[in-house]
Image (cartoon, rainbow, N blue to C red):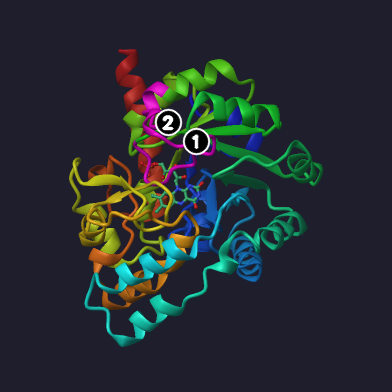
Amino acid sequence: MWNDTAVTRMLGIKYPIIQAPMAGGPTTPELVATVSNVGGLGFLGAGYMSADSIRAAIRRIRELTDKPFGVNLFIPDKNIQLDNGIVNSMRHHLKTLGQFGEEIVDEIDSIPVGNTLGDDFDQQMEVILEERVPIFSFTFGCPTREEIEKLKERGIRVIGTATTVAEAMKLNRVSVDAIVAQGYEAGGHRGTFLGFDESSLIGTIALVPQIVDRVNVPVIASGGIMDGRGIVACLALGASAVQMGTAFLVSSESGAHPKYKKAVLNSRDTETVITTAFSGKPARGIRNAFITLMQEYEAPIPPYPIQNTLTRPMRNWAARQSNPEFMSLWAGQTSALSREASASEIVQRLIQETEQVLSSLAQ
Ligand SMILES: Cc1cc2nc3c(=O)[nH]c(=O)nc-3n(C[C@H](O)[C@H](O)[C@H](O)COP(=O)(O)O)c2cc1C
């Protein structure tokens, strides 16, 4: 059976379909629990959440499901330098971009950035350990072998994210249980942690088999997978599961802003770009006015997470105003294939389509 894979056996799930963690609101406890309840794996994107809200979300998920689920965090980069000149120039620039109003302009001027450099990561990790979440995944970095062992000792399965073969091999050396191979098509932030440049932008169809050949743990394909065709293709490449973000972003249980969902549902194949404008870290999203305006900015953009903090007042304003031109509309290259439905309908349709594709190939 196609759904009996190294990942489904290891994680105790029925289908090798993982709803990607999506930090910033889309992955509500309701979305996570629904996907897990229908036999996939729901994942909470907790990267931006405080330790207390992560704990509350985990408890809510546990009220809604007794099936395995995952929680995902961002590994902080300890080498980030705070350069006040670069920050002040960005504050000045952001204020000139939109009709933001006094309050937002003041907030852009005064929002503190010094305390955003990963100080709360240790507290977030404490919650993961104390709550003994069934599955933990991470992106943007690679913890030490000792840190991974600490999780495994508590019975937590650990999954890392790689965008190149070298990153996958590094994750393999620190003994993660499985590796997400994140292709160029993927929506949201690039997980790249061993130096980002054009050469680390490898498409899913190129990346998955090369990683499969070089590691001794199961590989989870991610990036541009929207339906049964994508699932069968990734299984054929040697993946033991798929991780899908954009497909679930538009589900009724997703917490994404209605205007954001609409932009994804109405998008075309050429509309997404990789930009550092919103957060300082390369991420794929639908092009809007902010991305275009930022192309004129010639000074350096502060690194993640400083730029992310600096654009927060603007993004919150855009959400309140329902103005998608200043929201981060993260989505993958296949966003045009997204379909509005409940998460359980999406998973059920994915299962049916996968079976149809497999039977038509067998004829
Ligand atoms: C809105 C959004 C937010 C995301 N946030 C996270 C995150 O918090 N952690 C993570 O590991 N991946 C995150 N990703 C990337 C996904 O894990 C995955 O690689 C991606 O969605 C796959 O591409 P697809 O969107 O074409 O399915 C995010 C993706 C999107 C679209």
Amino acid type assigned to the residue bearing label 2 in the image: Ser
x and y percentages locating residue 288 in the rendered image: 22, 58
Residue at x-position 27% and y-position 79%: 100
- Residue 150, relative to residue 230: is it above or below? below
- Horizontally, residue 152 falls left or right of residue 297, namely right
Q: Nearer the viewer, residue 237 or 213?
A: 213
Question: What is the quadrant of residue 186 in the picture?
Answer: top left
Which residue position is annotated with label 2? Answer: 200
Residue at the extreme bottom: 102
x and y percentages locating residue 144 in the rendered image: 72, 39
Which of the numbered marks, if any, corresponds to residue 64?
Answer: none
Q: Earlier in the sequence, mark 2 or mark 1?
A: 1
Asked whether residue 356 appears in the rendered view, the answer is yes
Q: Nearer the viewer, residue 199 or 67?
A: 199
Residue 200 within the segment the image draws in magenta: yes
Residue at the extreme front: 85
Question: What is the quadrant of residue 168 in the picture?
Answer: top right
Q: Which residues are magenta?
A: 185-206
Residue 202 within the segment the image draws in magenta: yes
Q: Main secondary structure of the magenta part?
A: loop
Q: CA distance from mark 2 to mark 1?
A: 8 Å
Q: Nearer the viewer, residue 83 or 326?
A: 83
- Residue 248, relative to residue 203: is it above or below? below
Residue at the extreme right: 153
- Residue 311, relative to residue 187: is it above or below? below
The reply to whether discs 2 and 1 touch (Cβ–Cβ < 8 Å) is: yes
Neighbor class of circle 1 (other Cα within 10 Å; few <14, some 14-19, many 20+) is few
Which residue position is annotated with label 1? Answer: 195
Residue at x-position 38% and y-position 32%: 201
